[in-house]
Amino acid sequence: MSTPEHTSATDTTALETRQRALAAIYDHTTNPTRTASAISWAGWHLGEVAGVTVPLGLALTVWDGFYAFSGLAAACWAAHEVRLYLKQRAIRAKEAQR
């Protein structure tokens, strides 16, 4: 009766190969393609629009208190857009100084 061949715990060639493959796949998270950026933009904006319109629709049909939720979602959306604009402006100014 034979036993299986022992492999060392320090034998990392298979692990390193898998990590390199995963790094190649997930490299797009730091360098997204235009398609990935467009899909991300559409997804976030769909969520933002739904965050405003769903409570607004509920306020019109169910309970007036949903107006506050719609207003809060709109305020958060506006604050996020302003923060993003200021961040992009700072990045552009930094690049212009180079």
Image (tube, rainbow, N blue to C red):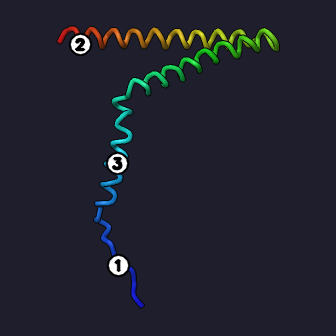
Does dot 1 land on a helix, a strand or a loop? loop
Residue 66 is situated, as x and y percent measured from the top left of the image, at: 73, 13
Q: Which residue is mark 3?
A: 21
Write down the residue under mark 2. Answer: 95
Mark drawn on residue 5: 1
Which class describes the residues within 10 Å of circle 3: few (<14), some (14-19), or many (20+)? few
The C terminus: image quadrant: top left
Q: Is residue 9 left or right of residue 81?
A: left
Residue name at image x 49 percent, y 24 percent: 39
Crowding at dot 2, Cα within 10 Å, few <14 / some 14-19 / many 20+, comes out as few
The relative height of residue 77 versus residue 24 in the rendered view (above or below) is: above
Check disc 3 and give the amino acid type.
Ala
Residue visible at 43% across and 25% down? 35
Expressed as whole percent of the image width and height from the top left, the position of residue 92 reads 29, 10
First of labels 2, 3 by sequence position: 3
Q: Amino acid at mark 1?
A: Glu
Q: Is residue 76 left or right of residue 69?
A: left
Crowd tier of the residue under label 1, counting other residues whose Cα lies within 10 Å: few below 14, some 14–19, many 20 or above: few
The first of marks 1 and 2 along the sequence is 1
Above/below status of 9 relative to 56: below
Which residue type does callout 2 highlight? Glu
